[in-house]
Amino acid sequence: MRTPTLFTTAIGTLALAASVGAHAQASGPIKVGLMLPATGTFAALGVAIENGFKLYVQEQGGKLAGRDIQYFKVDDESDPSKGTDNVNKLIKRDNVDVIVGTVHSGVALAMAKAAKDSNTLLIVPNAGAGDITGPMCGPNIVRSSFSNWQPGYATGVIAAQKGHKRAMTITWNYAAGNETVKGFTEAFEKGGGKVMKDLNLPFPGVEFQALLTEIAAQKPDVVFAFFAGGGAVKFVKDYAAAGLMKTVPLMGSGFLTDGTLEAQGEAAQGLITALHYADNLDTPRNNAFRKNYAIAYKANADVYAVQGYDAAQIFAAGLNAVKGDLAKRDALTAAMRKVTVDSPRGKFTLSAAGNPVQDMYIREAKGKDNEFRGVAVKALADPGRGCKL
């Protein structure tokens, strides 16, 4: 007679444990893993993304869906070879509920694979690698930023509309650069132009002189460039110093001048770029965001801050839908993917592959701002090639 009693007691204990576990999923702090660059050429970008994410949380009273937020940070080192080991610190050591990261596309690909293998929720606040919302797409992976293809494609549209016929491109030889150039080429050639030659150098190299000499010799109608961070500062200054600004118009993905204008100084003035954000978008949402960001961090917000802010908005939408209960993963991820984000950049939705469907703006560098000059493409959706959900 004792065996059934023991058996019943064991079942009751398991049921109690399950109940406590389920309750724990809906209470206590939510563990947010921030895997962003803290050193190297992209360090300032990582700071802006983190600041943006935390600003939104602060605006909600320091909680999301009524739950406290606990942060765990790992420097991604902008090194793809260390990506898997670094992200596993958050997944396996810290047992985070969601990972936010990163900037470098090569590192983000390693993160996406690890997130997919472990079914960890991943929000990408910058890296635009096509595979993340292409062949590697998954219900647990969304992006609050862009695909590399999008700003490249939008710049190609602008260049073709300006009547340019012969172009050269220049970038680092890595995923972000190569995919952005492909987007530019697709739109530019669809608009009647021809890309004469693609120039590149290893990431994060900044020895541009030989490539600038080749541009001067070839004399294209326009040059399209993709660089970011410290590399973008050096490239724009070198391009101007070579006298090319006066003979060969330079255009770029918006990252050429975002977060870099002050350092680029006079060399960048007048540069035309395309991106999903412009500093002076005169909307109540953007004005309030920029004011709050400046007060909180004593700095001007940029596109990286916006992307971090919107990563928090997307995560909050999922949490609110399940009242903070992380055990309801399917409902949480479904709500994240269905959200219309009221972003400082303008409202946007997510594609079936989890990438923003958003307006791409024409911007002109003026003073310390990338000023709005028009819409290059309305509601541009990345094709999500290879995504099978």
Image (tube, rainbow, N blue to C red):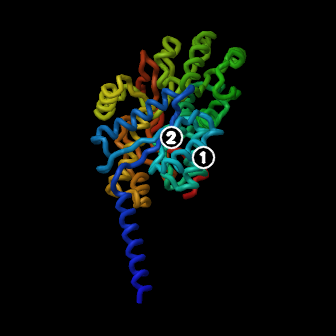
Q: Residue at x 46, y 16 (%)?
A: 262
Q: Which mark is residue 279?
A: none
Q: Residue at x 46, y 35 (%)?
A: 360
- The answer to whether residue 49 is above or below residue 220 is below
Image location (x, y in percent) of residue 357: 46, 44
The C terminus - image quarter: bottom right
Image location (x, y in percent) of residue 5: 39, 83
- The answer to whether residue 206 is above or below residue 275 is above
Image location (x, y in percent) of residue 104: 57, 35
Residue neighbourhood size for the residue with mark 1, other residues' Cα within 10 Å, grouped as few (<14), some (14–19), many (≥20): some
**Furthest-front residue in this view:** 2
The N terminus - image quarter: bottom left
Q: Which residue is mark 1?
A: 131
State the image quarter where residue 245 is shown: top right
State the image quarter where residue 21 is shown: bottom left
Residue neighbourhood size for the residue with mark 2, other residues' Cα within 10 Å, grouped as few (<14), some (14–19), many (≥20): many
Q: Residue at x 33, y 53 (%)?
A: 320
Q: Residue at x 50, y 40 (%)?
A: 101
Say which element carries label 2.
Answer: loop
Q: Nearer the viewer, residue 158 or 99?
A: 99
Q: Which residue is mark 2?
A: 101
Q: Disc 1 or 2, which lies upstream in sequence?
A: 2
Q: Amino acid at mark 1?
A: Asp
Q: Amino acid at mark 2?
A: Gly
Q: Is 68 displayed left or right of 177 in the figure?
A: left
Q: Nearer the viewer, residue 271 or 47?
A: 47
Residue 39 visible somewhere in the drawing: yes
Q: Nearer the viewer, residue 49 or 169?
A: 49
Q: Do labels 1 and 2 touch, CB within 8 Å?
A: no
Image location (x, y in percent) of residue 331: 40, 60
